[in-house]
Amino acid sequence: MKEGKEVKAAATPNGKIDQIIDKYQGDSSALIQVLLEIQSENHWLPKEALEKVSEKLEVPLNQIQHVATFYKAFSLVPRGRHEIQVCMGTACHIRGAPRVLDAVQDLLGIHPGETDLDLKFSLNTVNCLGCCALGPVMVVDGKYHGKITPTEAEKVLKDYD
Ligand code: FES
């Protein structure tokens, strides 16, 4: 699924989002904190959630939208529960990263910049993760997998719920 495509997906029940917002009891200065918590819980910021934040914290929706688009930590399009990064920097490229990326793409049916329909995985490529000696490198939810082969990459991803 391409980013920006409309998807009916609210992984987090509304009650949980309400709880997060209610914790701050209408304190508009907590806006970024509230958005961070919703992002962390839900992996992205659905429009309905932003409308609730706007209503309960009494902050105009366009101001919230501005904050949500300004900070890279926030996503306004659906994101998977797990974030995969495959390094395509020169060192990793030479050591076989394209084959690792191909295996991941084939397994998940998505390309870099996309999220699968189950909202399980989002896939991205990066240019260097600063650990070139470990190449090729794949990172899943911040966990580094170095010197990874296409088969190992598939195995790693199959272990995620
Ligand atoms: S090129 Fe992949 S970690 Fe540096």
Image: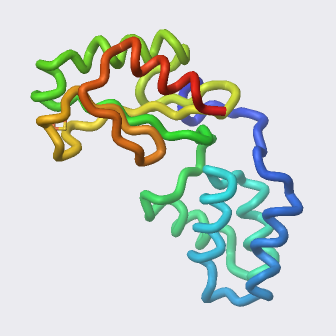
Say whether residue 14 is left or right of residue 158: right
Q: In this orientation, which residue lies closer to the viewer: 138 or 151?
A: 151
| Residue displayed at 77% across by 75% down | 21
Give x and y (percent) for residue 42. 68, 52
Q: How is the image coloured?
A: rainbow
* Image quarter hosting the C terminus: top right
Image quadrant where residue 135 sits: top left
| Image vertical order of residue 28 relative to residue 124, above or below | below
| Image vertical order of residue 36 relative to residue 130, above or below | below
Image quadrant where residue 91 sits: top left
| Residue displayed at 79% across by 64% down | 17
Q: In this orientation, which residue lies closer to the viewer: 44 or 69?
A: 44
| Residue displayed at 85% across by 53% down | 13
Give x and y (percent) for residue 49. 75, 60
Ligand 1 visible in quadrant:
top left
* Image quarter hosting the N terminus: top right
| Image vertical order of residue 159 relative to residue 155, above or below | below
Q: State how many labels appear.
A: 0
Give x and y (percent) for residue 86. 33, 30
Say whether residue 80 is left or right of residue 118: left
Q: In this orientation, which residue lies closer to the viewer: 85 or 111?
A: 85
Q: In this orientation, which residue lies closer to the viewer: 37 or 143?
A: 143
Say whether residue 106 is left or right of residue 54: left
| Image vertical order of residue 92 relative to residue 101, above or below | below
| Residue displayed at 41% across by 21% down | 153
Say whether residue 159 is left or right of residue 22: left
Give x and y (percent) for residue 85. 38, 36
